[in-house]
Image (tube, rainbow, N blue to C red):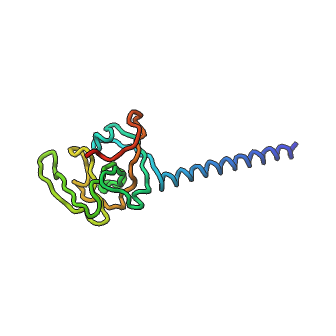
Amino acid sequence: MGLRNLKQWKSFAIEALNQSFLVAKFLCFLHVTNTYLCTVALTYGPSMLPTLNLTGDLVLAEKISPRIGKVGPGDVVLVRSPVNPRRVVTKRVIGIEGDSVTYVVDPKNSDRSDTIVVPKGHIWIEGDNTYDSNDSRKFGAVPYGLLQAKVFWRVLPPKDFGPLGQRAK
């Protein structure tokens, strides 16, 4: 009776170990995918109105383009905030290194504009909502190393499901 019981436990232990390895492989796959290929992000706030909703959109962002330098003006990107490194912000790329960018300094109070040449290794980002966005107009050009991903697809809300393209000019 003891030998039969031992065989049952051995069979159970082998099955449990196999299932544990399967779960571990799946979690490793998720980690690699989220870190190096594609990530899901929840965006909210007024800075990207009307492109993204105030109450929040769930978007997909790919991480390959920033690594190989394929991010350009008009792309919506996820950037580690230079002001608060714990936050990731969603903004639109206006200029890349070497570009001359003209922007309104304080759109709420004046029409005064300024022109800047984006320094090497930096990008100029702005929110689509010029009047309510904390972006490069306030903290300057952002180092390319803070660029995390390029947004390419809106998942939620369902009525807006689809690609997130360039802004119409």
Residue 13 lies, in percent from the top left, at 74, 48
Q: Nearer the viewer, residue 111 or 140?
A: 111
Splitting the image into 4 quarters, where does residue 122 fall? bottom left
- Examine the rendering and report whether any part of residue 87 can be seen: no
Residue at position x 32%, y 47% in the image: 166
65, 104: nearer the viewer: 65
Number of numbered discs: 0
Q: Foreground residue, 139 or 68? A: 68
Give how far across and how far down residue 164 sits, in percent: 37, 44
Residue lying furthest top: 159
Q: Residue furthest right?
A: 1
> For residue 141, what is the image quadrant?
bottom left
84 or 130, which lies in front?
130
* Residue 50 occupies quadrant: top left
* 149 on left or right of 109: right
Task: Indicate left or right for 131 with 164 as reference.
Answer: left
Q: Residue at x 20, y 61 (%)?
A: 116
Furthest residue toward bottom: 120
Quadrant of the drawing holding the N terminus:
top right
Query: What percent of the width, then of the height, locates residue 44?
Result: 34, 41
Residue 34 x/y as whole percent: 48, 51
Q: Is residue 111 visible?
A: yes
